[in-house]
Image (tube, helix red, strand yellow):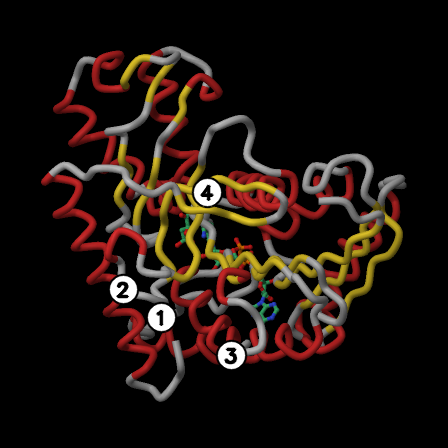
């Protein structure tokens, strides 16, 4: 993609992930070093002062590519003319809140933001939802933006993909860059399905190179799928730098393309590929070229993977139905 100046909206800009991503975006990690950047930072009123502090630090970084930073509490200002929207801010789960309450609280946020994107963003806007529950929030934002193409609304599963690469690299004693053709199917939740059945390390099938199916089908899968909770237990806060990095990886590839013949994992509304119900925002392997993603089709699932994918599909359908039961389109 070529554009000399790109407007990027980041919601939840005063939060931990926002702080982890904004300086890298300003430095050129998202779109390369030939593209100038304007930032629109959306926050809720109590966090506007902190977002202003982040904006001051962005100016103090004297980034050559950074041409403008605006902090606002108004979605129509934040998304006005946005080419890229990173929806990071979300309502955290608080004491006494059940999952349905959490889904509903976030549904309001993502409905408002989806509408604002529909009405104010630039043609061709690319939207990545990071705030949890990311897949269902993306489906809600998409439903609130009927004038935009559905495939403009993604949820982030690149962190799950990167986590799987990291575990395999550690185990095999190789660089993560030597691993290809991995996929993570389904929901960004503990039901996600890291799939190494097509993956290679240095050109060799992963199962052959690792030589331990029990580990691959057991501990590896559990560690990747539960990594978010494990990090919260260790840090006392959810992953932030790695989440910021994964969001940058996702949009970088969307903008500039996935390298070579390789693929990665994205979640966008299903168009029925692999029999996944249409509209579910579902993790699948994909390649990007010229700003468009194409799902990698024709991969075979083992019985084990097929069973796990049925469970993550049911998980996403359950989230969707809980939101719809409150009268919210998703
Ligand atoms: P955080 O609590 O540090 O920051 C969230 C920010 O969002 C806060 O500054 C808050 O004021 C803001 N916010 C809340 N509602 C908003 C709204 N309506 N508009 C604009 N801003 C709003 O949280 P964080 O660590 O930055 O994480 C952000 C979200 O990302 C959480 O939902 C977290 O669970 C999720 N997350 C997702 C992944 C993933 O892989 N998809 C990974 C890590 C974290
Ligand atoms: C993660 O995977 O690190 C987060 O989605 C965990 C969370 O609940 O914020």
**In the image, is residue 259 above or below residue 148?**
above
Q: Residue at x 36, y 67 (%)?
A: 279
Q: Residue 144: which disc?
A: 3
| Disc 3 to disc 4: CB gap under 8 Å | no
Kindly state the secondary structure of the residue where label 2 is placed: loop
Mark 4 and ligand 1: say if the CB distance to the nearest ligand atom is below 8 Å.
yes
In the rendering, at what x and y percent does residue 238 appear? 45, 49
Residue at numbered disc 1: 95
Q: Which residue is mark 4?
A: 158
Are the residues tagged 2 and 1 within 8 Å (C-beta)? no
Task: Indicate which disc, 2 or 1, sits on the residue closer to the N terminus.
Answer: 1
* Crowd around label 4: few <14 · some 14–19 · many ≥20 (10 Å): many
Q: Which residue is mark 2?
A: 277
SS for dot 3: loop
Disc on the earlier residue, 4 or 1: 1
Q: Which mark is residue 221?
A: none
Q: Is residue 74 above or below residue 298?
A: below
| Viewer-nearest residue: 207 or 27 | 207
Q: Residue furthest front?
A: 298
Labels 1, 3: front one: 3
Residue 61: % across, % down:
85, 41
Image quadrant containing the N terminus? top right
Is 107 on the left-hand or right-hand side of 208?
Answer: right
- Which of the two residues, 56 or 278, is positioned nearer the viewer here? 278
Residue at 46% over, 65% down: 138
Q: Earlier in the sequence, mark 3 or mark 4?
A: 3
């Amino acid at each position: 993609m070529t554009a000399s100046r790109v407007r990027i909206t980041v919601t939840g800009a005063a939060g931990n992930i926002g702080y982890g991503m904004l300086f890298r975006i300003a430095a050129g990690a998202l779109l390369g070093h030939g593209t100038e950047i304007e930032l629109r930072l959306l926050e809720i009123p109590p966090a506007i002062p902190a977002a202003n502090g982040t904006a001051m630090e962005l100016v103090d970084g004297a980034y050559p590519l950074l041409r403008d930073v605006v902090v606002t509490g108004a979605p129509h200002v934040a998304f006005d003319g946005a080419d890229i929207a990173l929806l990071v801010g979300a309502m955290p789960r608080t004491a006494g809140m059940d999952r349905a309450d959490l889904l509903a609280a976030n549904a309001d946020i993502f409905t408002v933001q989806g509408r604002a994107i529909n009405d104010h963003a630039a043609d061709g806007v690319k939207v990545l939802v990071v705030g949890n529950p990311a897949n269902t929030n993306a489906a809600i934002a998409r439903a609130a933006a009927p004038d935009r193409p559905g495939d403009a609304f993604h949820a982030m599963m690149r962190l799950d993909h990167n986590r799987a690469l990291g575990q395999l690299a550690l185990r095999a004693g190789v660089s993560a860059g030597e691993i290809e053709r991995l996929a993570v199917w389904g929901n960004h939740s503990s039901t996600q399905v890291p799939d190494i059945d097509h993956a290679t390390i240095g050109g060799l099938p992963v199962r052959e190179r690792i030589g331990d199916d029990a580990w691959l089908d057991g501990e590896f899968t559990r560690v990747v799928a539960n990594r978010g909770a494990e990090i919260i237990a260790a840090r006392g806060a959810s992953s932030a730098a790695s989440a910021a990095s994964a969001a940058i990886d996702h949009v970088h590839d969307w903008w500039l393309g996935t390298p070579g013949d390789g693929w990665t994992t994205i979640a966008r509304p299903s168009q029925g590929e692999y029999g996944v119900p249409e509209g579910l925002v579902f993790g699948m392997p994909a390649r990007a070229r010229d700003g468009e993603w194409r799902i990698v089709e024709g991969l075979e699932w083992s019985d084990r993977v097929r069973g796990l994918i049925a469970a993550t599909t049911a998980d996403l359908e359950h989230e969707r139905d809980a939101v719809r039961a409150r009268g919210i389109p998703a």
